Amino acid sequence: MTIVGFSFTQISAEKKPNVHGKININNNVTIVDVQTADLFLGSIKQPGLRFLFEYKSTYSPGLGTIVLGGEVLYMGDANKNSEILASWKKDKKVSGSVISEILNHVLGRCNIEALLISREVNLPPPIPLPRLKSEEKPEGKSQL
């Protein structure tokens, strides 16, 4: 049971002009669909699943959006894949350990891509970046 592939199928960004005030950024990732996928490793066919996802960063009030869509290829044994697919078809849900692995992988890749895209379209970073706090030093003293 492992992730064997990842690709983007949609990348879109939009920035609207003349928005003022406090900006709120909401990031959301959703699994859109789960499908069977036959994976070939050399000449050997392995059972797998294709998780289609959408990652969206929304800048409010109406400043812009970044949307990333894609797929994650997941390889597992046929019985586990059947359970996952049956659960998805019935409730549109996937079991905890598998969905955690998939979503963590998607977030890791999409957060980085959204950060790069935000710079290109001049939007604030969609994830908080670390910042150093400046410290006031008494006059006349310097530290090396």
Image (spheres, rainbow, N blue to C red):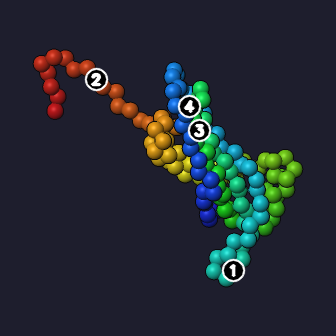
> To which residue does mark 3 refer?
65
- x, y (%) of residue 30? 69, 45
What element does badge 1 sit on?
strand
Residue type highlighted by circle 1: Ile
What element does badge 2 sit on?
loop
Q: Residues within 10 Å of mark 2 (few under 14, many from 20)?
A: few
Residue type highlighted by circle 2: Glu
What element does badge 3 sit on?
strand
Mark 2 against mark 4, which lies toward the viewer? Answer: 4
- x, y (%) of residue 46? 72, 73
- x, y (%) of residue 33? 76, 53
Mark 4 against mark 1, which lies toward the viewer? Answer: 4
Query: Which residue corresponds to the image point at 71% horizontal and 61% vertical from the top-left?
Result: 50
Query: In this view, which residue lies farthest toward the top?
Result: 139
Query: Which residue corresponds to the image point at 72% horizontal and 77% vertical from the top-left?
Result: 45
- x, y (%) of residue 136? 26, 20
Q: Earlier in the sequence, mark 2 or mark 3?
A: 3
* Residue 39 visible in rendering: yes
**Distance of label 3 from label 4 (alpha carbons):** 7 Å
| Label annotation for residue 44 | 1
Residue type highlighted by circle 4: Leu
**Distance of label 4 from label 1 (alpha carbons):** 49 Å
Query: Which residue corresponds to the image point at 81% horizontal and 47% vertical from the top-left?
Result: 92
Mark 2 against mark 3, which lies toward the viewer? Answer: 3
Q: Earlier in the sequence, mark 4 or mark 1?
A: 1
Horizontally, is 98 left or right of 82 in the view?
A: left
Q: How crowded is mark 1: few (under 14 residues within 10 Å), some or many (20 or more)?
A: few
Q: Quadrant of residue 47?
A: bottom right
Above/below status of 26 relative to 13: above
> To which residue does mark 2 refer?
135
> To which residue does mark 4 refer?
63
